[in-house]
Image: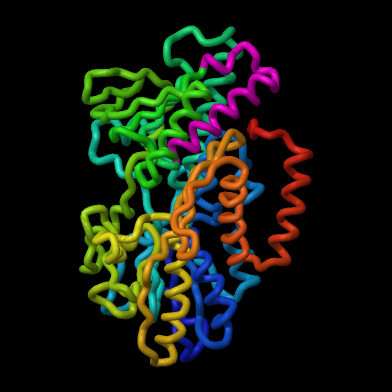
Amino acid sequence: MSESKTSENRPRIVVVGGGAGGLELVTQLGKSLGRKKADITLIDCSRTHIWKPLLHEVAAGTLDSHDDELDYLAQASSNGFRYVLGRMDGLDRTNKQVHLAAMVNEKGEEIMPPRTHPYDMLVIAVGSICNDFGITGVAEHCLFLDTTDQAEQFQNRLLEAYFHAHATGGVKETGQLDVAIVGGGATGIELSAQLHQATRLLSAYGLDNVKPSDLQIHIIEAADRLLPELPERLSKSTLKQLEKLGIQVHLGERVVEVTKDGMKTQSGRFIPAALKVWAAGVKAPDFLKTIADLETNRINQVVVRPTLQTTVDDDIFAIGDCAACPWPEKNSTVPPRAQSAHQQATLVLKNLRRKLEGKSMLTYRYKDYGSLVSLGKYSTVGNLMGNLMGTVMIEGLIARLVYLSLYKMHQLALFGPIRVSMLMVSGFFRRRLRPKIKLH
């Protein structure tokens, strides 16, 4: 069955994916074009949004996702767009319809049948997932941090293991509570630091049959250094901080198999772990690989021109992690970062308006403002880049404040300055009044 038009003669703009870029785009489209000039629709398979860079805190339990999540229905109602619950699994370019898969609940019961949704202009913003590179055992034994549900699943598994060890008198087997994280990029490092903090809080809250040192945290990285996107000095500084926290960092170790009990590496090492997290490499969702004859690359990203339109269809755009956007200065593609999605959402907002007005498209040029990696309350490292100051390496409090400002920029795009100010005040008191770790 097909969704009917909600109005006559108004162009239908559909954004699939409510991540950082997609939600910012659909919010701004709704404010500027919604209800009068165009019908704006967001399609997403979740009912709520949380900024993806926060998922490592959700996984560790140091952030309650319910405190920072945004309800799509409420956002749509107050910003002039419609929200449709659905998971894209196909595309009919001839009839301009997005195909949506059946939605089922946790019991496997169908709650929404397969459907189609019409569009005149389409923006694909479905983000990315971890790339397991086909390595044996990863899909069966590893946890991922691509969604809020996955982050909460990890947190539940961690708490279950911790409570079991506490109730049975402590850790009795090698690796019983250990966590192995594959990937020495920002996600793996930030998760390890948050887990280190969480173990101290759990012990302080009364689970004292388990000492913090009973939970060993391992980071396994195939390259010879952490954070290859940052200057080497910052990689070394990060490694030094992690080692100071007691986190085991294994560089130059490529995982070749994952088992129920741990990780096997190419060098012949076996690293035991009860919880295994895969945070190495990204790819776009698999359904994009052969979708409607759109051009895609080896990691399923939709290839786009500098206008962010697909190479075969002017009415279809792609942004964010699922888009392979040219980066001529590096003879590469734009990296999958939140800042990229934000910049692309801004450009597509202008281009959709121009398309409606019959004007020529603007082209996108990626501006690299640097990268930041947070080690929780312990440290933050990164580099800032700009025309006036060149490349500046920052650490400590200043880096932490800049890191926090990135989330506030995302919130400003969604809510505006007044509500963001109110959120900052309520968040301050919430942190003061509630425990610093989620225990349920």
- The answer to whether 279 appears left or right of 346 in the picture is left
Q: Is residue 112 visible?
A: no
Q: Is residue 246 magenta?
A: no
- Where is residue 210? Give x, y as percent: 59, 14
- Where is residue 64? Give x, y as percent: 63, 42
Q: Residue at x 64, y 64 (%)?
A: 74
Q: Quadrant of the N terminus?
A: bottom left
Depth check: 148 or 250 in front? 250
Q: Quadrant of residue 232?
A: top left
Q: In which quarter of the image is the C terminus?
A: top right
Outermost residue to the front: 389
Q: Residue at x 57, y 18 (%)?
A: 212
Q: Which residue is drawn at 69% across and 18% down?
A: 206
Give the answer, above or below, for where 205 lies relative to 100.
above
Depth check: 250 or 71 in front? 250
Extent of the magenta region: 187-214
Q: Can residue 319 be seen in this view?
A: yes
Counting labels gives 0
Give the answer, above or below, for where 4 lies relative to 244.
below
Q: Which residue is drawn at 40% across and 29% down?
A: 219
Q: Main secondary structure of the magenta part?
A: helix
Q: How is the image coloured?
A: rainbow
- The answer to whether 301 appears left or right of 203 in the picture is left
- Where is residue 293? Give x, y as percent: 21, 68
- Where is residue 24? Give x, y as percent: 53, 66
